[in-house]
Image (tube, rainbow, N blue to C red):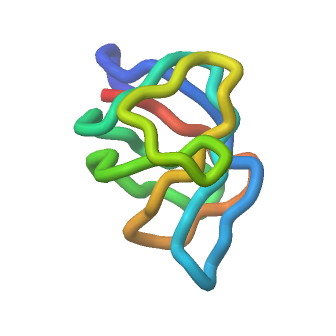
Amino acid sequence: MSEQETEIGEVMTYYANIGVAAVELTDSVKVGDTIIFRGFTTDLEQKVGSMQIEHDSVQEAKAGDQIGVKVSGMVRKNDRVYKK
């Protein structure tokens, strides 16, 4: 983990059929941010293209929110999520 990365949450669930990760946030994130998923077998970096809270599209989310975010690869429950 480099100095400019901040841990912002944890993957609760991964929906493989739709390529979406449910993330419980401990910090804020917004559309356009670059996020990184890291775990035992996960190392996936991508920009947040869109995210949802309770099936509603949102531009930003804060600590305590649970978001759904489209991911470009497989992630796993308990993977940590960082913001660059």
Estimate the x, y position of residue 45 in percent, counting from the top left: 34, 51
Q: Nearer the viewer, residue 23 or 1?
A: 23
- Give the side of residue 9 with respect to residue 30, left or right: right
Residue visible at 46% across and 46% down in the picture: 57
Residue visible at 50% across and 26% down in the picture: 61
Q: Quadrant of the N terminus?
A: top left
Q: Taking 33 as reference, is 79 above or below it?
A: below
Estimate the x, y position of residue 31 in percent, counting from the top left: 31, 37
The total number of labels drawn is 0
Q: Nearer the viewer, residue 31 or 43?
A: 31
- Give the side of residue 6 with respect to residue 25, left or right: left
Q: Nearer the viewer, residue 50 or 82?
A: 50
Residue visible at 36% across and 29% down in the picture: 30
Q: Taking 7 as reference, is 20 above or below it?
A: below
Quadrant of residue 2 within the rendered picture:
top left
Estimate the x, y position of residue 84 in percent, counting from the top left: 30, 28
- Give the side of residue 43 with respect to residue 33, left or right: right
- Give the side of residue 74 with respect to residue 60, left or right: right
